Amino acid sequence: MKTPRRPLLPRAARRLLSGAVLLLALSPAMLCAQAPPTPTPAPANPAVTDTEAPNAFWDCTLPGGNYTVLLGKISVVSLHEFNLVGGRVTELNIVTEGDALARFYFMEALLPGGGTAAADLAKTRLTELANTAADRTGTEKIWQKVQKDYPLATHAHTIEFRMQTKADLLSLHASAKKAWTSGHGRIVTVK
């Protein structure tokens, strides 16, 4: 007489194991069915217009000039921050296959003890007054230009643009990166 064969696993463990196998088998199908995450759009910046162009160029017009580059020639689009004596710089670099480097930057002064709301408000108001005066008299807004101390601070093969706000700089970075990674040209203008 044969003794009944005992299963290796109790009935509850076999059910659990078969459920786990079924779950593993269906996991790829469930993952594929999920919608990809939608990217968070960059905040709107009314001072910057950014539209798709029908060509393969990133064309950027700024108060200090114009920079146009063929997207296929771009090898790097980078954004970084660093401190200087008395200030902080946020910088966008566009490196191409050629000799020139495009550098767009925003400088902010570091006030001793940190900035205050009153100081920021005063700076904003003074800038508005200076802009109004320059517009009325037809004079050039030199505070919007790159400042260099020749020959100490020359950057050979560098095309430089100084931005008036960090938001403008971040909008340029988003536009350049979008154009470069998608291969679709863009026209961006900073007012």
Image: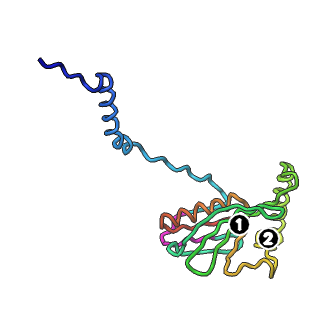
What residue is shown at x 48% (from left), y 47% (from top)?
37
Query: Cβ–Cβ below 8 Å for labels 2 and 1?
Result: no
- Exactly how many numbered labels are in the figure? 2
The numbered dot on residue 141 is 2
Task: Give the quadrant of residue 189.
Answer: bottom right
Secondary structure under badge 1? strand
The main secondary structure of the magenta stretch is strand
Q: Amino acid at mark 1?
A: Tyr
Q: How far across and down, in percent of the image, does residue 54 sit? A: 48, 69
Task: Give the quadrant of residue 166.
Answer: bottom right
Residue 125 within the magenta-colored segment of the rendering: no
For mark 1, does the 10 Å Cα neighbourhood hold few (<14), some (14 to 19), or many (20 or more) residues?
Answer: many
The quarter of the rendered structure image containing the C terminus is: bottom right
- Provide the residue designation for mark 1: 105
Task: Give the spatial CA distance, label 2 vs label 1.
Answer: 17 Å
Image side of residue 42 versus residue 134, left or right:
left
Q: Amino acid at mark 2?
A: Lys
Q: Give the foreground label among 2 and 1.
A: 1
* Most distant residue in the right direction: 112
Task: Give the quadrant of residue 143.
Answer: bottom right
Secondary structure under badge 2? loop
Does 12 appear above or below 87? above
Name the foreground residue: 82 vs 179.
Answer: 82
Q: How far across and down, in percent of the image, does residue 22 sit? A: 30, 34
- What span is in magenta? 51-60
The quarter of the rendered structure image containing the N terminus is: top left
